[in-house]
Amino acid sequence: MKKIKNEKVISLLLVATASFSALYFIIQQNMNAAILSMTVMFTLTNFFRSRTFKEQGHEKESKWMRKMSITFAVLSVLVLMIMIAG
């Protein structure tokens, strides 16, 4: 039970950090960094949602969320590469 509670706290902190950083970069008008923060946020939310669905026995939904998480992870890497390239 303690492991699940800690995982929820960690997931909440990670998603909140990504959300607030996206908001910060939007206010600063740094759209590349904002998009990177949002794709990281979507990666994290879909990853943790996938784990939750799997724990609840929803295998089909879990696989879909895992695929979405991987998609957003790839997009995050692409955005980072674009930012580095200039």
Image (tube, helix red, strand yellow):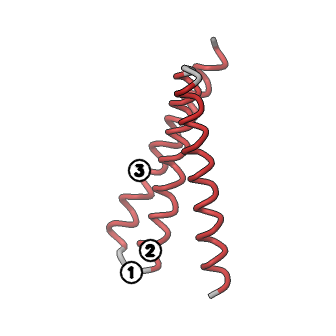
- Looking at the rendered structure, the secondary structure element under dot 1 is loop
Q: Is residue 3 left or right of residue 76?
A: right
Q: Is residue 60 left or right of residue 22?
A: left
Cα distance in 3D space between marks 2 and 3? 15 Å
Residue 65 at what x, y percent from top left?
A: 40, 58
Mark 2 or mark 3, which has the lower sequence index? 2
Amino acid on which the number 2 mark rests in the picture: Lys
Residue 83 at what x, y percent from top left?
A: 61, 20
- Looking at the rendered structure, the secondary structure element under dot 3 is helix
Circle 1 sits on which residue?
57
Determine which quarter of the picture holds residue 1: bottom right
Circle 2 sits on which residue?
54
Amino acid on which the number 1 mark rests in the picture: Gly
Cα distance in 3D space between marks 3 and 1? 18 Å
What is the crowding at mark 2: few (fewer than 14 residues within 10 Å), some, or many (at least 20)? some
What is the crowding at mark 3: few (fewer than 14 residues within 10 Å), some, or many (at least 20)? some
Q: Residue furthest front?
A: 27
Give yes or no for contact between labels 1 and 2 (Cβ–Cβ under 8 Å). Answer: yes
Residue 68 against residue 9 in the figure, above or below: above
What residue is at 58 percent from the left and 19 percent from the top?
A: 82
- Looking at the rendered structure, the secondary structure element under dot 2 is helix
Marker disc for residue 68 = 3
Give yes or no for contact between labels 2 and 3 (Cβ–Cβ under 8 Å). Answer: no
What residue is at 55 percent from the left and 43 percent from the top?
A: 40
